[in-house]
Amino acid sequence: MTEFSAVLAQQLPEDVGKSGPLGLLLTVVLLIAVVLLVRSMTKHLKRIPPSFDPVEPGEQVPDTPAELFEPQPGQEVLDNLRRAPLAIEPPRRADDGRPERSSDH
């Protein structure tokens, strides 16, 4: 701390507020970096699609009426799964033999 105050005491009043060549170089380097970053960001922003919503396929219309009645691939498996019992049971009722809880607590 005393070294800093000694340097300030040696400084002449006309030198106060003047910057050296190192400050100019640093300013120019920072300006060049900002210009390059702005150019890079505009390139990246131009590549962004207008919407991130997934593209939904439209309805598939068969070409001939016969295709309406032909089974589609995997249709049999889907039909079997629709007829199968559910893996998740519905909530049980209070008449299953268990005593009901009272909310008096």
Image (cartoon, rainbow, N blue to C red):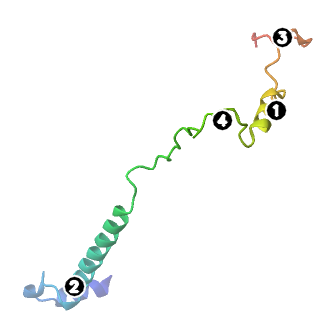
Label for residue 3? Answer: none
Decide if residue 48 is on the left or right side of residue 99.
left
First of labels 2, 4 by sequence position: 2
User: In front: 51, or 104?
Assistant: 51
Between tags 2 and 4, which lies in front? 4
Residue under label 2: 23
In this picture, is 44 found above or below 22? above
Number of other residues with Cα within 10 Å of mark 1, as a class: few under 14, some 14 to 19, many 20 or more: few
* Location of mark 1 (residue): 80
Name which of mark 4 and mark 3 comes first in the sequence.
Answer: 4
Question: How many badges with numbers are in the image?
Answer: 4
* Foreground pick, 16 / 38: 38
Between circles 1 and 4, the one closer to the viewer is 4
Instruction: Determine which residue is flagged by label 3.
Output: 94
Q: The N terminus lies in which quarter of the figure?
A: bottom left
Task: Kindly report the distance in space between the C-alpha atoms of the residues bearing marks 1 and 4.
Answer: 23 Å
Residue 88 versus residue 67: which sits nearer the camera? 67
* N-terminal-most mark, 3 or 2: 2
Dots 2, 4 in contact, CB < 8 A: no
Residue at the image point whose x is 81% and y is 27% from the top: 83
